[in-house]
Image (cartoon, rainbow, N blue to C red):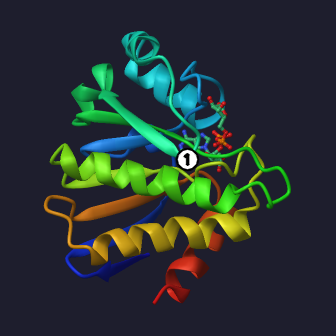
């Protein structure tokens, strides 16, 4: 499924983000940028060990923000950058989780555009081991993407959500349909 907002297409796809061809792919990282399981494990495996070295050199990233590195071995697949976005751990919803999740998406979008990416692929940040409820996370993700599109970014033309299972794809689809 896809929808256009201003000059930008927002697209939903089922599958492994390391297989998506985009100028930048986003991983759901931790604030220590130490690598991990889930999508972060897959991205680190696909990019090779230099990615962790680059993360160590940066040292860390605030929750609700993101940092950008080269894509190393993913460059062979046409990916120029990896964006390491740090979403919040769900603590019940009254610890600023929604704002922090927004920040992880908006900072990633800003980094992609300032690095002249025309396309960027996102996973569903925080809805795995960080347990952010999917029904609340999907509208935030889609709204941040649509809002960024409405600000008419200079370079970005495609925002892809690469979603790993049917349930996540379904909830994102409803959110994208509902987005105004
Ligand atoms: N491609 C796309 N999506 C994936 C992939 C993949 N290869 N692997 C997992 N996912 C999906 C999960 O199914 C989930 O929907 O990504 C979503 C986010 O799940 P997590 O990877 O658990 O991310 P998050 O909840 O943000 O937790 C971040 O997990 O691995 C650690 O270093 C990471 O500590 C950080 C934490």
Q: Quadrant of the N terminus?
A: bottom left
Q: Quadrant of residue 175?
A: bottom right
The kind of secondary structure element at disc 1 is loop
In this orientation, which residue lies closer to the viewer: 138 or 89? Answer: 89
Q: Quadrant of residue 26?
A: top left
104 w.r.t. 83: above or below: below
Q: Is residue 169 left or right of residue 132?
A: left
Q: Which residue is mark 1?
A: 64
Residue 121 visible, this orientation:
no
The residue sitting at 23% across, 26% down in the picture is: 76
65 w.r.t. 155: above or below: above
Q: Residues within 10 Å of mark 1 (few under 14, many from 20)?
A: many
In this orientation, which residue lies closer to the viewer: 128 or 45? Answer: 128
Q: Position of residue 125 (x, y in %)?
A: 59, 50
The residue sitting at 45% across, 68% down in the picture is: 144
Q: Where ligand 1 lies, by quadrant?
A: top right
Q: Position of residue 25 (x, y in %)?
A: 37, 42
Q: Quadrant of residue 135?
A: bottom right
Q: Is residue 131 left or right of residue 41?
A: right
């Amino acid at each position: 499924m896809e929808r256009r907002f201003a000059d930008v297409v927002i697209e939903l796809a089922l599958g492994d983000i390391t297989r998506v061809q985009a100028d930048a792919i986003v991983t759901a990282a931790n604030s220590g940028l130490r690598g991990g399981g889930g999508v972060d494990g897959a991205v680190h495996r696909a990019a090779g060990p230099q990615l962790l070295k680059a993360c160590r050199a940066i040292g860390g990233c605030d929750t609700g923000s993101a940092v950008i590195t080269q894509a190393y071995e993913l460059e062979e697949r046409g990916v120029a950058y990896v964006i390491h976005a740090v979403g919040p751990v769900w603590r019940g919803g009254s610890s600023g989780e929604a704002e922090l999740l927004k920040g992880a998406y908006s900072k990633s979008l800003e980094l992609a555009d300032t690095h002249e990416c025309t396309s960027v692929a996102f996973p569903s940040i925080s809805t795995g081991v960080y347990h952010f409820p999917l029904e609340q996370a999907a509208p935030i993700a889609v709204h941040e993407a649509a809002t960024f599109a409405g600000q008419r970014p200079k370079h970005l033309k495609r925002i892809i959500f690469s979603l790993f299972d049917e349930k996540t794809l379904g909830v994102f689809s409803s959110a994208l349909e509902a987005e105004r």
